[in-house]
Image (cartoon, helix red, strand yellow):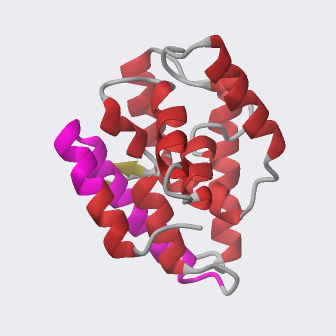
Amino acid sequence: MFPKREKAIEILEESNLLNPGPWKDHSIVVAECAYKIASKCDDMDEEKAYVLGLLHDVGRRFGVTYIAHVIDGYNYLMEFGYDEAARICMTHSFQLKDINEYIGEIDISYSDKEKIINLLNGYEYDDYDRLIQLCDSISMPTGPVDIAIRMNDVKTRYGYYPQDKWNKNIELKKYFEDKVGGLEIC
């Protein structure tokens, strides 16, 4: 389950009041890209894609954190029964289902780390997981950019970007370009 667009916007606005930052505008760009791509896919719901994109970073409402935003967003949305949106909070950072690929600090407890690992291992990624991963990798707060620009931005801020994750993002981009008939995706 996931909230309607209006409720998702309300959650995002409230979350940004708690922890203002460029993550809000980034989330809006992710949502817009996800909507645009999903609308070109016969087997995807563009409203669902929009809402999932809008809420993928909602764990940032709890402060400036790293991997903690993943589990915080998951737990927060599960409180409302929004399991599909909570799942995206979890999967958007792990294209390869490997917690070691996370770019940034591991600022969580051992039990939260185990919870993330178990959840990731239990998911069979679908096109919504893949779509939000892709849109996250092409979205800056100011708008969509070439995937290499976005990944280099992350690399500049954190000092590295795992090659396997980089390659997976390129693969996701090609997957959706093929799925929408070779058109530019966003």
Name which residue lies at 46% across and 44% down: 76
Question: Looking at the picture, does residue 51 appear above or below residue 135?
Answer: below
Query: Residue 39 lies in magenta, yes or no?
Result: yes
Query: Residue 95 lies in magenta, yes or no?
Result: no
Judged left or right of residue 179, residue 82 is left
Judged left or right of residue 91, residue 10 is left
Name which residue lies at 58% across and 45% down: 92
Does residue 186 show up? no
Q: Which residues, given as a range, are shown in magenta?
A: 12-41
Q: Using the rendered view, name the quadrant where residue 5 is placed.
A: bottom left
Residue 48 location (% of width, % of height): 53, 73
Q: Using the rendered view, name the quadrant where residue 178 is placed.
A: bottom right
Residue 180 location (% of width, % of height): 63, 78
Name which residue lies at 53% across and 16% down: 108
Question: Looking at the picture, does residue 141 appear above or below residue 116?
Answer: below
The C terminus sits in image quarter: bottom left
